[in-house]
Every structure is written in structure tokens, then in C-alpha cells.
Image (tube, helix red, strand yellow):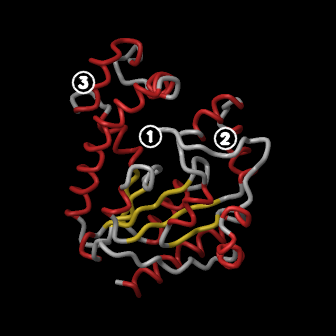
Amino acid sequence: MPAAPFSRPKPSHPPSIASVVPALRRQVARLSVGTPRQPNRREGRMSPSSRQIGVTGGIGAGKTAVLQLLGEIGCRTVDADDVVHWLYEPGHPGYEIVSRRWGKRVLTAGGEVDRKAVAEIVFRERSELQWLNGVIHPRVRERIRSLASESETPLFCGVPLLFETGWDRFMWRSVSVWCPFRVQWQRLRHRGWDQEEIERRLACQMNMDEKLARGDFGIINNSSWRQLREQCRLLVERLEHAA
């Protein structure tokens, strides 16, 4: 789910969380061994009855892994990227929208939407990016709202651009997943992306330090799968107590 670009430090000079948000230094040390940060109470936030908990973080931070672990614990989850996939299926609104806009160049030989082709267009042309956001985001938001209303338990919603789009105002709580910049860079290189592609993608997001500072809870994904699972377990425990 792309959005308008945000400024960030150049990749050759990875940002330090201590230099960007000094107040989080002790919190990060605590989080790295599995303790979620306490929520930031803000006026106007929705009540637990909204049943939506936003999970966000920079690209490559580990949002998908966190959603997977939350699902294994027994939580209800939905990923906004999966909702976009659903919208792009033939017969759904997103398919007609993008095929009408860009024609066959965003369709595979089998007639399905080629998300890589869509990304190639929108990450190179800001006007196209803004147009796509304007038509797809409301539909994604409505689908997530519908799923949440059908759930008897809180729904953990993976939204890559939770803060950039302002969707955090629809959530009861927000969770930011963080990892060191060098780890993020390595993960993106493992996807087969070159430096130019990585820089384009990162320019479309808030940096992870700011996301962590804005989240009600933080999860630090810089260690083992076991510690990540433990942080997810503690997160659920804290949220149960907060309800």
C-alpha cells in the first residue's frame, strides 16, 4: 500500500534510534528482550469496542512475521496487503480500477493484475501513486472495518502505512515493529531489490524510528524467532489488561 514519499536519511548513513528519539533508548533495550512498551494514551482514540489493533512498521521490519505469530497464539489477524490482493482479483473493484487506468501493461498473460508492474509505475510516478492511494485505500479500509465488525475478538490489522495514511485514528491501539536499519537493508536485498529500488521504497515511508515513537506498543525484531514470539505473547497479555 504505497503513499506519498517521506524524507529519510541516506542509506549510507543509517539512522540511530538513540539520536532520533533519545527517550526510547531504555525502552528499546527492554523491548529487545521481549517487553512491549506501554501505550501512549491519546485523546479521541477509539474504545476497545472498535476491535481493531493496528500493526505497522517499516518495510522488512517483520510485520508479517508478527501477524503470523499472533495468529499462532490464537488472535484474529488481517493484512492490508492481502486485502489489496483480494481487491485485485478479477470481478473485484480493484481489478477494474487498475486495468481501466493502465490497461494490459499491468495484467499478466493470464489476465490477472501484475502487482510488480503496478509497483513499477507508482513508485516512479508520484502522481500515479497518489491516484492509486486515493481509490484503493478507502476500499481497503472498508474491508478491514467489515471484518472487524464480524469478529467477536479484537482484530490485529497489518497496515504498512498506518501513520502515513492517518489510519491509526481508527484503531484502539497501534503496534510498531522495529529492526535496525542495517538489518532492514539486508532483508530488502534478499528480496532481490537493488539499491535504487530499495531507496524508492523507503522514500515512500516514515522511517522506523518515528513509527516506533508513535506506536502505542513496540516490538523489536532484532533477535531470535523465540524472542519475537515472546514479545507477541506479552503484547497480547498487555492488551488484555488494557481492555
Q: Earlier in the sequence, mark 2 or mark 1?
A: 1
Q: Which amino acid does label 2 sit on?
A: Leu
Query: Which residue is labeled 3 in the image?
Result: 96
Instruction: Give the spatial CA distance, label 2 vs label 1.
Output: 19 Å
The N terminus is located in which quarter? top left
Does the CB distance between marks 3 and 2 fall below 8 Å?
no
Which label sits on residue 188? Answer: 2
Which residue does the image show at 40% across and 18% down from the upper left?
106
Please, is residue 90 above or below residue 7 in the view?
above
Residue 202 rendering spot, x and y as whole percentages: 60, 41
Choose mark 2 or mark 1, whichever is in front.
Answer: 1
| Pointer 3 or 1: first along the chain | 1
State how far apart marks 3 and 2 are (Cα): 31 Å
- Please rate how many residues cluster around mark 3, counting C-alpha atoms within 10 Å: few if below 14, some from 14 to 19, many from 20: some
Residue drawn at x 75%, y 50% is 14
- Residue 125: image x %, image y %? 48, 23
Indicate which disc residue 3 carries: 1
Q: Is residue 63 left or right of residue 228?
A: left
Across and down, in percent, residue 118 comes to 44, 25
Q: Is residue 172 left or right of residue 199?
A: left
Residue 226 marker: none
State the SS at label 1.
Answer: loop
Q: Which of marks 3 and 1 is in front?
A: 1
The tag earlier along the polypeptide, 3 or 2, is 3
Secondary structure category for the residue under label 2: helix
